[in-house]
Each structure stands twice: as C-alpha cells, then as structure tokens.
Amino acid sequence: MFILLLLLLVFTGLETTGTEAFSVGVCYGRVANNLPPAEEVIDLYKTNRIERMRIYDPDQPTLEALRGSNIELVIGVRNEDIQSIANSVSLATNWVQNNVLKYSQDVKFRYIVVGNEIDPNNDQASNFVVLAMQNIYTSLASAKLQNQIKISTAIQMNLLGSSYPPSTGAFSDSSISFITPIVNFLVENEAPLLVNMYTYFSYISDPNNVDLSFALFNSQTDRAIDGKYEYRNLFDASLGAIYAALEKVGGATLEVVVSESGWPSDGGVAATVENAQIYYENLFNHVSSGTPNRPNQALETYLFAMFDENQKGPAETERHFGLFTPNKQLKYQITQMHGSSNSTSSSSSSQSGPGSSSQSGQGGITYFTSSSSSSRQSGGVIIYFCISLLFIFFI
C-alpha cells in the first residue's frame, strides 16, 4: 500500500515540475505605432507563460492591464523625470502613489528602475540618480514596501574602461563618480544592479577579434582563461568584467541582473533569424545554471524585446529585436517557450533597445520550460495505472 502511494506521489510530482520557470523575463518596449493594445500584450505574456516584464515608463494602460495577471513587473522612471524627482520629495511621493501604490494590491512590482543607460558624460540626469533613488525609497518606506520592492538603475557596458581579460574589469575614470554612490546605495539596501548587456554589439564592433560563435554561446574551441575562471562565451566574459569592476568600487556582494539582452533578426551584420534563434535558445539554457563567477546560481535575465519596434533607430537593427512581430506572431521556434506553436491562439482577433531612450531601451524577456504533450500524456497514463491499482487493492 505504501509503495503504491509513493509511486502516485512521485509521478504526480513529475507532472508538475515540468512547468517551473527560470529567472528570465521579457522587456516590453513601445517605440512603435503598430503594436497591439496593452490588454492583448498581457494576454500574450500569459499565453506564453512569460512571468516577468520590464517596462520603461509608468504606462497607465499597461499597469491597468497587469491587474490580477500575476506577472512580476520591473517599472522604470524616465530619464527626463529623474531631476525633478530628485529635487522634490513631494514629486517622488506622487510618482510612487500614482504608479505603484495605486496598483500594488493587484500588480506584483519587483523593481523600480531609476533611469535607463544614463551617460555620466553627456546626460545631466546623472547628477541626480542617487538622490532620486533615495527619495523614491523614502516614499516606499512610508508605505512599508521598501523591502518588497527594490530600487535600482540600469547601466550599459560602456561604463567600463577596461573589460578584458575579465579580471581587469574596471569602470572608466569618467564614470567612477557616477557609479560609486549608486553601488553604495544598492549595497546598503540589498538591491541588485541592473546591466544591459549585448554580445551582438561587442561582436560587430570588433569582428576580427571576436568570433561569432563565441558571441552566440556556440563555440567549441574558443575560451578565455583568466586566473581560476574559464570563460567559454562572450556573455560570461562580459559579466565577469562587471563583477570585477564592482569589486573595485565596494560592490563585491552585489547581485547583478541582466536587464536587457538580445540579438537582432535583420538590418545589419550577422543580424539574421537563425543567429537570433541560436542566441535566445542558448541564453535561456545558460542563465538557468549560473556563470563561472557565480556557478549554480540562476542569473535573472530580461530579453529584449517583446516586439519589433518600427520607430526605433537610428540603426536599422534596432527595429528587429522583437521575439514577436507586431501582429503577435512568434518569430522563433524556441523550444523552452511554452505554447510556442500556438502562441497567438488566444488573441487572434486583434488588430494590428537597443537605443538609449528611457521609454524603451535595449529590452529583455522571460522564457519558461514546460513538459511536452507526450510526457504529460505518459504521466497521466502512469497516474491512472496507480489509481487503478489502489482501487483493486481496496476491493
């Protein structure tokens, strides 16, 4: 009797574990004039079991559509709003009230991201990021949400002055005064640093020294030996440089979230559907198991982006980072993505960054594994068999 019950529990467990999610999400950028309504976008996330979303501004239709969806949200403060929020606690409180507290009973907020890819050399907002973060923190604390919703900012890789070998990673002299107080704030409040990271741009900027397969996680021979670490792909090497740079400014314990990563399907060198599919599949598999610097620790990652955005630029590639076309057709057959073969079935009646804009920068995405239909069927047969044996036993 005990054995039969144990078999039933084991096979029931096998049935459910096939649908667990990895730490990957998708960025929802909206620099386009042909995207579906927010309600249909949320339905598309749910249909494809995408359980985390990043948006770049507090878009009210999106926030309304997210109510009750159970999708975890990373919400951005626009670059152009940072200075005013930094200069006024009242404005920070209003921002939190109107864009977070108003929805907090029905929307799962994960992070508030104060600015996207702020350039300390050319953007005046860089002088106000930390103060804006502090004011928003104060507003969250007054609602007792400061431990539930973490505050951060999203940086780009070009803040590094040195990145290879990875152990020499260091922030440039011109960015040290910008990043150091941010790191101090994040360490003090146990919040992660968000980093937008694209191996595509590293490859096209130096194709003679960076092998395409190394950028796509596909290399069988290329590797970078750096002290005790061995890097087999450009993604891990770039992340290793970030960890090394953080150690030098007091951020050795900081968690890093890859807040954008992707590969374009058209518009430039090596920008093909085939390469994009290879990148997304490999990235998805890779981040679930950790990196050389932090092995056996899933790396929270957001793919860029949900849709192709036809008003991005100036480079043509920036219009082709979507996982979906604007009419909600999935561009790639990604095996880890639940329902990829019928992803638009629930919303077929609808009408139809890598730029540094604060409304939609280089985005990110969430993918999840699911058990195949054959494994679900075989699990069901086994469960039915066990139940039948139990019935016979009692009779």
Image (tube, helix red, strand yellow):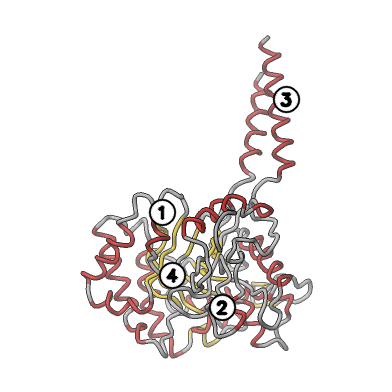
Q: Please name the residue shown 42% across and 59% down the image.
A: 110
Closer mark to the observer between disc 4 and disc 3: 4
Q: Position of residue 68 (x, y in %)?
A: 42, 48
Q: Earlier in the sequence, mark 2 or mark 4?
A: 4
Mark 4 touching mark 3, by CB under 8 A? no
Task: Give the label, 2 or 3, closer to the camera.
Answer: 3
In this picture, is 322 found above or below 50?
Answer: below
Relative image position of residue 296 (x, y in whole percent): 60, 58
Farthest residue, direction top: 395
Q: Quadrant of residue 278?
A: bottom right
> What is the spatial separation of the Cα atoms under label 1 and label 4, in whole angstroms?
16 Å
Instruction: Please tell me how many numbered marks the rendered image carries.
Output: 4
Instruction: Say which residue label 4 marks.
Output: 56
Q: Position of residue 175 (x, y in %)?
A: 43, 86
- The span from disc 2 to disc 1 (Cα, nearest Å) is 32 Å
What mark, if any, has residue 108 been given in the picture? 1
- Viewer-side label of 1, 4: 4
Tell me the kind of residue under disc 2: Ala
Q: Quadrant of the N terminus?
A: top right
Residue at mark 3: 385
The residue carrying pointer 4 sits among few (fewer than 14), some (14 to 19) or many (20 or more) residues within 10 Å by Cα, namely many
Q: Nearer the viewer, residue 336 or 176?
A: 336
Alpha carbon distance from label 2 to label 4: 26 Å
Q: Are marks 2 and 1 in contact (CB under 8 Å)?
A: no
Q: Secondary structure at mark 1?
A: strand
Residue 360 lies left or right of residue 239; in this view the side is left
- Which element carries disc 3, helix, strand or loop? helix
Task: Using the image, determine if residue 172 lies above or below residue 40.
Answer: below
Question: Which residue lies under the disc numbered 2?
Answer: 241
* Few, some or many residues within 10 Å of mark 2 (<14, 14–19, 20+): many
Looking at the picture, which amino acid does disc 1 mark? Lys
Q: Camera-side residue: 372 or 141? A: 372
